[in-house]
Image: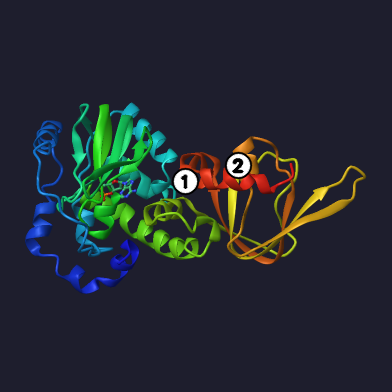
């Protein structure tokens, strides 16, 4: 069963979250020393478990409003958190108040080279991490083989899956050198990120699954792209982007049609392409740093999903696909 499907369909299990589990959550914010000892403990090997039962966490619960723990921080720590969150697509759908809650409740933990921050298969995952500095390698055990699937750096985050879907940890996350992590406990994560993220992922992912460009991406990659998308609508004949301008967004057509035109040396306008639902445009300016190579105009009412330059640059999976397809243009 897919992660999102599971999240949406396990309402019954969701109701069964026991009282004792909720009590445990209230004690989850640990001091740096306690965190360090947890990370040392987690070096001890434990039996591996496969991701099998995925049950949705509660999406909303007023009880959590009162349990938020505000951790005192210096002004420079607060601004460092905003700086990091701005780079991370996870936080891109939050309003000001939600961002403030994130800043208030995040706490810093540090790990040394080789520390296992998250162990694949652990069923008691209760934290979400955002890297302040350092590098974290993500490994997935596939039978006997341990595969490095991602290397995360400052501004990247990890550990969301277990919290979103109440699932065992899907991968192991290991410090490569010293790492500083801004951390959210499960209560803050639930309160601020859970509903927005599940909503955004559910809607966007079902669209992305129909986009031919992404047909070879795995579920995790699709979910990551889902987090980064913003929706915008245009009226008939409205230009989405204009030839010659600097570009800072990549677009997917959620619904509708566009016409791409180019200005010729004699001043005439030539239609060069038509695109429809599921197709994309606007990638060239981001991949090449050149100005927009054509004007793209809505034909009828149009809804697009866009990704900004910064996020686009972090989505290695999309960039690789688009670079491959760039050969089809005559530029
Ligand atoms: P979680 O399952 O909570 O803990 C391990 C984390 O590794 C996971 O959340 C994701 O944040 C992260 N991760 C990075 N790449 C992958 C991947 N390809 N598959 C699964 N998890 C991944």
Q: Residues within 10 Å of mark 1 (few under 14, many from 20)?
A: some
Whether 103 is drawn above or below 60: the answer is above
Residue that numbered label 2 is attached to: 248
> Which label sits on residue 124?
none
In screen coordinates, is 286 left or right of 56? right
- CA gap between label 1 and label 2 equals 18 Å
Residue at 21% of width from left, 52% of height from top? 187
Depth check, mark 1 against mark 2: the one in front is 1
Task: Pinpoint residue 13: horizontal percent, then vertical percent.
Answer: 18, 70
Q: Residues within 10 Å of mark 2 (few under 14, many from 20)?
A: some
Task: Pinpoint residue 322: horizontal percent, then vertical percent.
Answer: 57, 46
Quadrant of image for the N terminus: bottom left
Residue that numbered label 1 is attached to: 317
Q: How many callouts does the rendering have?
A: 2
Q: Is residue 83 at least partly visible in the picture?
A: yes
- Disc 2 Cβ-to-ligand 1 distance below 8 Å: no
The residue at the far left in this view is: 20
Viewer-proximal residue among 307 and 187: 307
Residue at 80% of width from left, 49% of height from top? 262
| Quadrant of the image occupied by residue 302 | bottom right
Local secondary structure at mark 2? loop
Q: Is residue 107 at least partly visible in the picture?
A: no
In screen coordinates, is 150 left or right of 244? left
Quadrant of image for the C terminus: top right
| Quadrant of the image occupied by residue 239 | bottom right
Residue at 41% of width from left, 34% of height from top? 83
Task: Pinpoint residue 283: horizontal percent, then vertical percent.
Answer: 61, 46
- Disc 1 Cβ-to-ligand 1 distance below 8 Å: no
């Amino acid at each position: 069963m897919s992660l999102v499907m599971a999240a949406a369909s396990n309402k019954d299990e969701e109701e069964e979250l026991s009282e004792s589990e909720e009590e445990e959550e209230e004690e989850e914010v640990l001091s740096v020393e306690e965190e360090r000892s947890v990370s040392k403990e987690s070096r001890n090997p434990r039996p591996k478990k496969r991701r099998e039962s995925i049950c949705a966490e509660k999406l909303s619960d007023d009880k959590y409003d009162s349990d938020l723990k505000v951790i005192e921080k210096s002004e420079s720590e607060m601004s460092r958190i905003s700086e990091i969150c701005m780079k991370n697509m996870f936080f891109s759908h939050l309003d000001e108040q939600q961002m403030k809650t994130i800043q208030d409740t995040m706490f810093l933990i540090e790990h040394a080279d080789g520390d296992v921050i998250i162990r694949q298969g652990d069923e008691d995952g209760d934290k979400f991490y955002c890297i302040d500095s350092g590098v974290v390698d993500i490994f997935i055990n596939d039978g006997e083989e341990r595969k490095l699937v991602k290397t995360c750096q400052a501004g990247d985050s990890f550990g969301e899956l277990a919290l979103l879907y109440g699932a065992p940890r899907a991968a192991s996350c290991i410090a490569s050198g010293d790492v500083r992590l801004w951390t959210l406990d499960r209560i803050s994560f639930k309160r601020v990120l859970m509903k927005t993220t599940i909503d955004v992922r559910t809607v966007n992912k079902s669209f992305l699954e129909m986009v031919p460009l992404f047909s070879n991406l795995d579920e995790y990659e699709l979910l990551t792209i889902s987090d980064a998308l913003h929706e915008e609508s245009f009226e008939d004949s409205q230009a989405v982007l204009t030839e010659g301008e600097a570009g800072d967004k990549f677009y997917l057509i959620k619904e509708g049609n566009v016409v791409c035109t180019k200005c010729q040396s004699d001043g005439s306008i030539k239609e060069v392409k038509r695109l429809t639902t599921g197709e994309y445009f606007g990638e060239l300016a981001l991949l090449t740093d050149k100005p927009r190579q054509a004007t793209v105009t809505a034909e009828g009412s149009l809804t697009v999903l866009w990704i900004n330059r910064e996020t686009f640059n972090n989505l290695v999976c999309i960039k690789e696909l688009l670079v491959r397809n760039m050969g089809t243009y005559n530029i």
